[in-house]
Image (tube, coloured by chain):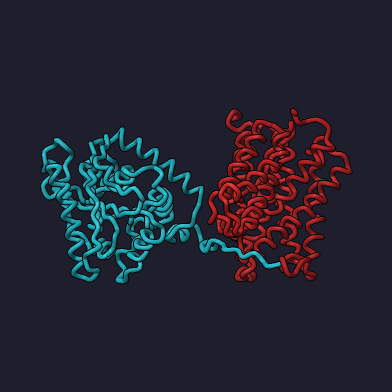
Chain colours: A red, B cyan
């Protein structure tokens, strides 16, 4: 059991497993009560229920991927990043030019390989080589028409959708990665959910009405409160964190989350699609669900690397 | 500054099951990789388990634009023919497959679209939209088709009358039609049987024909269809299998398998 599922031995793993299980059960019971009440016929309740059911799949998947240990976790985040690239290239039309997509995918694979073998130097230098390769591609083909757009979209895909989430994978090289990774993932998703719920309940003032009409100032404040409470509650499970780092974590989770959300929102608006995909019922594509993580993961990673002493092998 | 224009994949908002039935399929490296891996493994399996032999590969037109037409009595037929093609061609070679069977559920669609690279052919519809899809693959996509003009798998192995679709595609055009004959596939894996038996399968590919000088009217199409059917039957006779009957494996007595399993 523990050879296949090494993280089970980690107390932080069991702690977060319990927290998420309790949250999902309580939230589920509340929704069930709502569904059975006279309000149950409402469209909003139905949609929230569908989105909740997706969480019943995603939650266990997250714990499964962390539970399998460092290598499978890195591999699964890598797969996720490749799927981000796929969704993005389909939404923007980049998919029609296979060469660019393939170059991006190869560099993403190299990136996660470097996370797997723990080569930090290559990991942070990778965009240099990736971007150079992408800029060489039109020259090799002696083509110029529309090439800035293709190179530009490819660089966005490589750096924003490959490199940013790869920080979550590289985090797994830290001694206390299970505690950190689960805090990051659970905190980010909690922030999203809290912003959505608080916005629905109290939302009056729209945050960025043109990009994302559903986001409200009240939602942001609500999520800030929830994330602050969450971080305070789990402070004992964040080894090496000073009070200043706890505050920084709250800010990263909350504002990073909102920025990540808005970033994918403006991409969708500009391209003219509603969702990046249909993989997760009630949520949209993978990118619609993981948009916040693209921002919170690298910021949280570098905060730990700079300010938490020791822990990384290299 | 002029805004960039984006062309999202038109199937983006569809569910996976719906996406898979859309043809032509969008370029997708993930699918190509899976398809390549599948084709490689199937080739190994066909060679080892069924001792697949292919004769006449040299008849396949080098530019990769043709219709490969064969008798049909088993699920092994399409993969057997695909295995006769160069690996580099699997992405632009499409097996014409009945939409009502190969795309009837998510799992079947997934298998048909990703592994078989199937073109969903609506054999129930009265219009010619599916044939137009086929024509587009050949003309616009410069790809190849694998087609079984009998329209369904033969139960007793006898070659059934060809349907006119192949005539409609080829009459009055320079499209090379390559006849092929598959023997042994029905014995190895007949319609309605769950598991294939390890019996020898052999594919014989004949010389391509074009029908540019045949008028593209009904008579011409009937004529082309008959010609193609004759070509496949000739290959069967060349292999010593009369009328394609029983499509027996080489060296095995014809008729021994006349029990004919049914669904």
Can you see residue A52? no
In the rendered view, would you say A3 is above or below A16?
above
User: Residue A262, located in which quarter of the rendered image?
Assistant: bottom right
Left or right of residue B162, residue A167 in this image: right
Left or right of residue A146, residue B171 in this image: left
Can you see residue B136? yes
At x 31%, y 32%, the residue is B48
At x 39%, y 42%, the residue is B87
User: Residue B124, located in which quarter of the rendered image?
Assistant: bottom left
**In the image, residue A125 lies at what x, y percent?**
72, 38
Q: Nearer the viewer, residue B41 or A66?
A: B41
Q: How many marks?
A: 0
**In the image, residue A216 lies at what x, y percent?**
77, 66
At x 29%, y 41%, the residue is B195
In the rendered view, would you say B237 is above or below A88?
above
In the rendered view, would you say A98 is above or below A112?
below
**In the image, residue A169 lies at what x, y percent?**
67, 39
Outermost residue, front side: A142
User: Residue B83, located in which quarter of the rendered image?
Assistant: top left
In the rendered view, would you say A268 is above or below B241?
below
Q: Nearer the viewer, residue B223 or B155?
A: B223
What quarter of the picture does the N terminus of chain B occupy? bottom right
At x 60%, y 63%, the residue is B6
């Amino acid at each position: 059991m523990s050879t296949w599922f090494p993280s089970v031995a980690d107390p932080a793993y069991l702690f977060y497993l319990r927290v998420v299980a309790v949250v999902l059960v309580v939230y589920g019971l509340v929704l069930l009560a709502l569904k059975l009440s006279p309000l149950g016929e409402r469209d909003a309740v139905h949609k929230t229920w569908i989105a909740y059911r997706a969480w019943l799949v995603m939650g266990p998947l997250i714990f499964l991927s962390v539970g399998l240990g460092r290598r499978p976790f890195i591999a699964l985040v890598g797969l996720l990043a490749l799927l981000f690239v796929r969704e993005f290239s389909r939404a923007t039309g980049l998919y029609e030019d296979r060469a660019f997509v393939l170059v991006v995918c190869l560099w993403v694979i190299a990136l996660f390989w470097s996370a797997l073998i723990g080569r930090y130097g290559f990991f942070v230098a990778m965009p240099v080589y990736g971007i150079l390769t992408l800029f060489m591609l039109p020259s090799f083909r002696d083509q110029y028409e529309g090439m800035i757009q293709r190179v530009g979209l490819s660089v966005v895909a490589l750096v924003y959708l490959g490199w940013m989430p790869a920080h979550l994978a590289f985090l797994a090289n830290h001694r206390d990665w299970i505690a950190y990774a689960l805090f990051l993932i659970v905190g980010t998703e909690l922030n999203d959910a809290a912003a959505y719920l608080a916005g629905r309940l109290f939302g009056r003032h729209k945050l960025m009405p043109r990009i994302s009409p559903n986001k409200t100032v009240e939602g942001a404040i609500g999520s800030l409160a929830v994330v602050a409470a969450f971080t305070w509650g789990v402070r004992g499970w964040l080894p090496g964190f000073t009070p200043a780092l706890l505050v920084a974590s709250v800010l990263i989770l909350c504002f990073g989350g909102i920025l990540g959300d808005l970033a994918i929102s403006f991409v969708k608006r500009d391209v003219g699609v509603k969702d990046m995909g249909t993989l997760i019922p009630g949520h949209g594509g993978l990118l619609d669900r993981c948009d916040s993580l693209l921002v919170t993961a690298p910021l949280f990673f570098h905060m730990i690397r700079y300010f938490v002493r020791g822990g990384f092998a290299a | 500054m002029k805004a960039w224009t984006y062309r999202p994949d038109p199937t983006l908002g569809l569910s996976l099951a719906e996406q898979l039935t859309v043809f032509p399929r969008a370029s997708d490296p993930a699918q190509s990789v899976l398809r390549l891996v599948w084709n490689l493994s199937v080739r190994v399996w066909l060679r080892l388990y069924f001792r697949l032999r292919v004769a006449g590969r040299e008849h396949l037109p080098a530019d990769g634009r043709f219709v490969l037409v064969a008798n049909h009595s088993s699920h092994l037929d399409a993969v057997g023919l695909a295995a006769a093609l160069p690996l580099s061609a699997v992405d632009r070679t499409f097996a014409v497959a009945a939409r009502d069977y190969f795309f009837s559920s998510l799992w079947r669609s997934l298998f048909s679209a990703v592994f078989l690279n199937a073109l969903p052919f609506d054999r129930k519809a009265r219009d010619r939209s599916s044939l137009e899809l086929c024509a587009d693959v050949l003309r616009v996509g410069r790809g190849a088709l694998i087609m079984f003009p009998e329209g369904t798998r033969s139960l007793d192995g006898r070659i059934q009358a060809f349907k006119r679709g192949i005539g409609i595609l080829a009459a009055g055009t320079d499209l090379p039609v390559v006849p092929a004959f598959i023997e042994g596939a029905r014995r190895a894996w007949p319609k309605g049987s769950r598991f294939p038996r390890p019996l020898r399968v052999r594919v014989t590919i004949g010389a391509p024909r074009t029908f540019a000088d045949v008028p593209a009217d009904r008579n011409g199409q009937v004529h082309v269809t008959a010609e193609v059917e004759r070509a496949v039957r000739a290959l069967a006779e060349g292999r010593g299998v009369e009328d394609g009957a029983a499509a027996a494996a080489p060296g095995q007595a014809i008729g021994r398998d006349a029990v004919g399993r049914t669904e």
